[in-house]
Amino acid sequence: MALRNIRKLGDDILRKKCRPVETIDEKILTLLDDMAETMHEANGVGLAAPQVGILKRIAVIDIGEGLIELINPEIVDVEGNIKDTEGCLSVPGKYGYVVRPSKVTVTALNRDGEKVTYNAEGMLAKAFCHEIDHLDGIVFVDKVTEFVEVEQ
Ligand code: ZN
């Protein structure tokens, strides 16, 4: 495994739309491993492939309940909405309020190519929405209604 360089806001790659993964090969598995390591090292709760310079529909999430690996994730259902603070490893030191669905249903492939369905709420729902946005070139700052000052 290896740490990858996290791209920061201003890097064009964060604004591009990612392509679906067609074959889950060794390269994809290595990318998943590297992304999890990079996310954990940076104390993040999620990381999407474009944040490490790869335009593929892949993300990893870990809100402290175990690692979730997402290949070609899609939000298939949403419910309610909730306003909460967010940050991003690509936007260090900036936090703001974003309105997101309070519950989401997400389908994705796991590393074995099996279709998995997640029903998420709270922080996990927020993480799914944030990371899947990255795959379409959307960064949370685009959706912030109000930035918040955080004491470092
Ligand atoms: Zn992010």
Image (cartoon, rainbow, N blue to C red):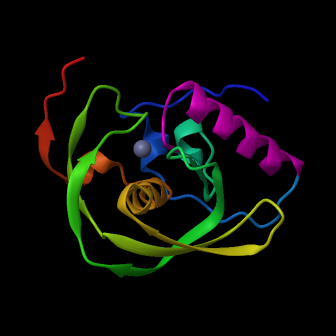
Whether residue 25 is situated above or below residue 31 in the rendered picture: below
Residue 78 percent coordinates (x, y): 37, 79
Q: Is residue 93 left or right of residue 96?
A: right
Q: In this view, does 19 lie to the left or right of 83?
A: right
Magenta highlight: main SS: helix
Residue 97 percent coordinates (x, y): 18, 49
What span is in magenta? 26-46
The tally of labels here is 0
Residue at image location 14% in from the left, 36% down from the top: 148
Q: Is residue 139 left or right of residue 63?
A: left
Which residue extends farthest front? 65
Residue 39 percent coordinates (x, y): 57, 35
Whether residue 35 is situated above or below residue 110 in the rendered picture: above
Place residue 50 in its image quadrant.
top right
Residue at image location 81% in from the left, 48% down from the top: 29
Quarter of the figure with the C terminus: top left
Which residue extends farthest top? 152
Whether 88 is among the magenta residues is: no
Residue at image location 53% in from the left, 44% down from the top: 64
Whether 45 is among the magenta residues is: yes
Whether residue 78 is situated above or below residue 142 in the rendered picture: below
Place residue 111 in its image quadrant.
bottom right
Q: In which quarter of the image is ligand 1?
A: top left
Residue 17 percent coordinates (x, y): 50, 58
Quarter of the figure with the N terminus: top right
Q: Which of 147 and 23 is in front in this view?
A: 147
Residue at image location 14% in from the left, 40% down from the top: 147
